[in-house]
Amino acid sequence: MGLTTKKLQSQLVASEPPHYFEVRDTRGERYCHCGSEEDAQRICEMYWAYDYTYVKVYPDIPETVNVQHTVMDPDPQLSEQKILPESQQQPLNL
């Protein structure tokens, strides 16, 4: 596939809201979550004797919130510190 424009890319892929698949046991309780429908189907096939099922779940997407920014003072920096005066420093011999 060659280079495309954003307009052409949106035509290539059908956009669907974010979702995941939830596998449920015979009592309807959650067994696991899957990112693809194929994975959910495979798990249901593995537990075919227990009649596991799966559903597509669309999570609630929170609304975008605008937050005001605050300009703060730059972090104060420590000045260079010499613990020992140069006359007492000794080279490290390894």
Image (cartoon, rainbow, N blue to C red):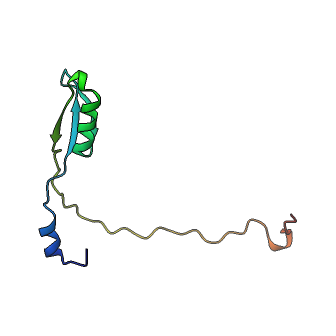
- Which sits in the foreground, 1 or 8? 1
Relative vertical location of residue 79 with respect to residue 59 in this rendering, above or below: below
Residue 50 drawn at (x, y percent): 23, 22
Residue 66 drawn at (x, y percent): 19, 61
- Which quadrant holds residue 27? top left
Exactly how many numbered labels are in the figure?
A: 0
- Which sits in the foreground, 53 or 57? 53
Q: Residue at x 78, y 67 (%)?
A: 84
- Which quadrant holds residue 56? top left
34 left or right of 19 in image: right
Relative vertical location of residue 35 with respect to residue 4 in this rendering, above or below: above
Relative vertical location of residue 63 with respect to residue 38 in this rendering, above or below: below
- Which sits in the foreground, 59 or 3? 3
Q: Residue at x 22, y 36 (%)?
A: 22
Residue 1 drawn at (x, y percent): 25, 74
Q: Residue at x 33, y 69 (%)?
A: 71
- Quadrant location of the C terminus in the rendered image: bottom right
Q: Residue at x 20, y 22 (%)?
A: 26
39 left or right of 57 in image: right
Residue 63 drawn at (x, y percent): 15, 54
